[in-house]
Image: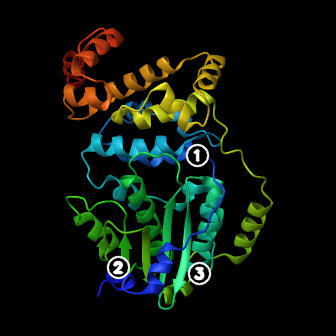
Amino acid sequence: MILCAKLHQTEQGRNWLARGETGSMSSVPMVFARSVRKIADAVAARGDARLLLRTAGLDHDAINDPGRRIPYADMMLLSEHAAMMTKDGAFGLHAGERETLDTYGIVGYSIITSSTVEQALRCQVRYLPIWTNVGMFRLEVQGPVALFRWEYSPASLPESRHDCETSLATVKQYLRLLTGGQWKPREVWFRHRKPRDVSEHGRIFKAPVCFGMPTDALLFESNLLSAPIRSANPHAHRMLTDAIERRPADALEAQTFSQLALSLIRQGMSRGQVGVETVSRQLCVSRRTLQRKLKQESCSHRELVQQARQELSRFLLSSTSATTVEAAYALGFSEPSAFYHAFQQWFGVSPQAYRRAAGSH
């Protein structure tokens, strides 16, 4: 019997799913910009990765900067844009399948040098905030079943399907590799709706996958927690974790006010939620404070909206099959004619002419 049905039948199971820990997280989740490299690399063979990066105001220098952080929502939007560009309905799974732990710096190495699966997972739980404050992993054990849960922060975030599938596919991939194939999930849970095609979910996880669940998680036999890690190095692990524990807290919010506002505008664009009142409310400031802070950074709300629309319009017309009408509404225009007029002003050609020129290169 599938666990998702069995757990729901018990009071203990319901309490387990409902139990949560509170933690302090920034109202604007951040992540190292170099996390975006996996997305850019995944689209490079099938599309213009530079154009994709520009939809989030990034370039290759930015994603190779070891210290730069960006709003996590920008990376989530890039995953969705990459899926559109590559026409890959399982883009998130494929990105996770290709992940390597050395991408995650000292956090990844603390996992690689762990002695057991349990130690590796607890390192991920404890040290993830070094990499991002977008959410948290939790390891819970109930008798013969262990559950490794992923929870996003309650902050305003865009559609998370591909990003979430990347996260769980990454965990599955590294545990399988680190244990020489000993570890495998018993079930996989996702909160989002079941996609039209789930064949890649079955191939990658090799376990029943349940959708519309109360949490995103990997479920596995708890005795696998003691499975040994092939790359274990207790001495190196102790040195790494000692260094991490002594590490001063990083300022995850080290972004300009205009960059944060621009990220929120990108998130709300397709829903038409890019107005001054909406953005100021999301940033927990008054309308006047928003305008004053943007002016101090030599920009305005109107300019940020225009910048976001220009970046996304070029991407939609040159790298996806979206029609000009669909692009107009995705950019938050009330009607297509307004989009056509604005595009002509921005680039000196009509959307149709731009698309034809992009297709000829």
Q: Name the residue: 30% across, 24% down.
A: 333
Q: In front: 1, or 199?
A: 1
Which of the labelled discs sits on residue 4, or is there none? 2
Q: In front: 355, or 322?
A: 322
- Rendering coords of residue 271 (x, y %): 35, 36
Q: Residues within 10 Å of mark 2 (few under 14, many from 20)?
A: some
Q: In front: 320, or 276?
A: 276
Mark 3, residue position: 116
Q: Name the residue: 22% across, 66% down.
A: 199
For mark 2, give the secondary structure.
Answer: helix
Q: Is 125 positioned to the left or the right of 222 in the image? A: right
Q: Name the residue: 65% across, 63% down.
A: 127
Q: Is residue 19 above or below residue 304?
A: below
Q: Amino acid at mark 1?
A: Met
**Cα separation between marks 2 and 1:** 32 Å
Q: Residues within 10 Å of mark 1 (few under 14, many from 20)?
A: many
Q: Amino acid at mark 2?
A: Cys
For mark 1, give the secondary structure.
Answer: strand
Q: Is residue 297 above or below residue 199?
A: above
Mark 1, residue position: 30
Q: Amino acid at mark 3?
A: Thr
Q: Residues within 10 Å of mark 3 (few under 14, many from 20)?
A: many
- Rendering coords of residue 207 (x, y %): 32, 77
